[in-house]
């Protein structure tokens, strides 16, 4: 249980419920709206006048902290030195050398967030979660996850000495499971799907008083994920691309992507918020279905190789839908075959190795160009949210197999190597 509940954070005004729009002052830890219950996801409200005094384009030019902590003035945290934490963020933004031309785009950039310390964008949320848990005096942090949130939670917590309890569905890939275990987390592999895993974690967290890192409901998580947008903007000299494409599962990452650009817009640091393209697999596309039918989200089966975005019951629908609607973006779904193609193409043609959910964004860009949603005179940033080493089984499906040969040059010449 936490030792303290009151923090002194001058730039934090409080919370607003995304459902009933009631405001709550920032006095203590809050996860969801007391009136609306679990669906009452909260927004965090900032005092941009205070933030403006602490961060600007010029102050960032002189800031040599090459991590997401360079943006701590925009996070819901106390002003502390986070230099001993894992180095999360400031991942490369590569200008595409081939794929953008192939699609006929004016410019394509690839933000490789697989290069974070535990190899996914989720490190951004976990870094902030760990900081918040320590700030509030917890000794244990817990979450349920399809894999990356959990492995990043375990890694970032290990660095600070926080204990970690993780709940994963039994389908979690071995690479992610290995990460959690090597970082010393207590891992519970739940015999069930993600929804059942989430519900068990919720009950356990409530009963044992751990810090709740469940991204769907904890508003702090999207505030970490938004740093990917702050970086994209800064790396493009505060002239972000027309579009930013992101793969969508629970909805928390796309929510964060929007929040980052919105913050910069509110602060006058960018002139326009990019259109956000939310991409799902056709095997699990509750957001795409809801947007197409103009109807509330319906639970859908979880039937895709992109395990990180295989979420049939997203916990953060309001913020995710807002990210696309408020940015005049679009939703799109792509097949698992298209995801495997994207994995191979990004690897072969750009040297970026993403996991299936990581490259789904790029598969979505291809589809959006084909459908005329993204035009050839536009610029696009594609967020690759996790490393392909997380899931080598699917990587090998995408890439094919090695040439087999005895150690004999004549035999080598008879192989496919020379065909
Ligand atoms: Zn409410």
Image: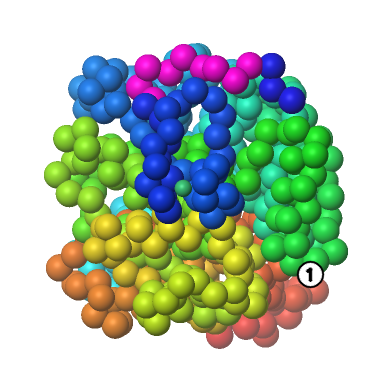
Looking at the image, which residue is at 24% across and 17% down?
53
Mark 1 — residue? 407
Task: Indicate whether 164 appears above or below 328.
Answer: above
Quarter of the image with the C terminus in it: bottom right
**Of 350 and 321, the residue lying toward us:** 321
- Judge whether residue 293 can be spotted in this image: yes
Name the image quarter holding residue 228: top left
- Judge whether residue 358 can be spotted in this image: no
Looking at the image, which residue is at 37% across and 17% down?
10
For the record, the magenta segment spans: 4-12
Quarter of the image with the N terminus in it: top right
> Where residue 57 sits: x, y (%)?
22, 27
Relative side of 23 to 27, left or right? left
Disc 1, SS? loop
Magenta stretch, main secondary structure class: loop
Packing grade of label 1 (10 A; few <14, some 14-19, many >=20) is few
Task: Indicate whether 30 appears above or below 114.
Answer: above
Relative side of 242 to 125, left or right? left
Looking at the image, which residue is at 33% across and 62% down?
324
Task: Indicate whether 352 appears above or below 9.
Answer: below
**Of 302 and 314, the residue lying toward us:** 314
Name the image quarter holding residue 284: bottom right
**Of 399 and 238, the residue lying toward us:** 238
> Where residue 148 sits: x, y (%)?
64, 51
> Where residue 295 sits: x, y (%)?
42, 76
Looking at the image, which residue is at 56% across and 29% down?
29
Relative side of 181 to 383, left or right? right
Task: Indicate whether 135 appears above or below 330.
Answer: above
Colour convention = rainbow
> Where residue 304 sits: x, y (%)?
62, 75
Tell whether position 373 is magenta: no
């Amino acid at each position: 249980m936490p030792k303290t509940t009151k923090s002194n954070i001058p730039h934090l005004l409080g919370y607003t419920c995304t459902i009933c729009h009631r405001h709550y002052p920032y006095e203590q830890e809050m996860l969801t709206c007391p009136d609306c219950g679990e669906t009452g996801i909260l927004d965090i409200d900032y005092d941009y006048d205070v933030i403006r005094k602490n961060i600007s384009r010029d102050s960032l030019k002189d800031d040599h902290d090459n991590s997401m902590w360079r943006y701590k003035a925009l996070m819901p945290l106390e002003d502390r030195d986070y230099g001993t934490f894992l180095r999360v963020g400031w991942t490369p933004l590569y200008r595409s050398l081939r794929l953008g031309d192939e699609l006929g785009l004016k410019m394509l950039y690839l933000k490789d967030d697989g290069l974070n310390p535990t190899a996914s964008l989720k490190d951004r949320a976990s870094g902030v979660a760990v900081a918040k848990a320590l700030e509030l005096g917890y000794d244990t942090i817990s979450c349920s996850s399809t894999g990356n949130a959990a492995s990043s939670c375990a890694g970032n917590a290990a660095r600070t000495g926080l204990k970690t309890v993780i709940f994963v569905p039994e389908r979690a890939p071995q690479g992610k499971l290995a990460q959690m275990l090597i970082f010393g987390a207590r891992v519970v592999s739940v015999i069930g799907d993600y929804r059942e895993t989430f519900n068990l974690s919720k009950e356990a967290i409530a009963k044992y008083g751990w810090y709740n890192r469940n991204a769907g409901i904890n508003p702090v998580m999207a505030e970490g994920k938004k740093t990917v947008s702050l970086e994209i903007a800064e790396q493009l000299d505060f002239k972000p691309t027309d579009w930013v494409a992101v793969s969508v599962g629970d909805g928390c990452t796309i929510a964060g992507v929007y929040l980052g650009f919105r913050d910069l817009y509110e602060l006058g640091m960018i002139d326009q918020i990019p259109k956000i393209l939310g991409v799902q697999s056709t095997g699990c596309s509750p957001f795409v279905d809801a947007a197409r039918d103009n109807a509330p989200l319906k639970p859908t089966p979880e039937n895709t190789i992109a395990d990180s975005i295989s979420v049939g019951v997203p916990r953060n629908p309001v913020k995710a839908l807002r990210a696309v609607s408020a940015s005049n973006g679009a939703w799109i779904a792509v097949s698992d075959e298209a995801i495997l193609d994207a994995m191979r193409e990004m690897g072969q043609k750009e040297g970026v190795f993403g996991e299936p959910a990581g490259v789904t964004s790029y598969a979505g860009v291809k589809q959006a160009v084909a459908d005329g949603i993204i035009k050839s005179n536009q610029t696009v940033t594609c967020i690759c949210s996790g490393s392909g080493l997380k899931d080598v089984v699917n990587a090998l499906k995408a890439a094919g197999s090695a040439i087999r040969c005895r150690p004999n040059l004549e035999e080598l010449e008879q192989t496919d190597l020379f065909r």
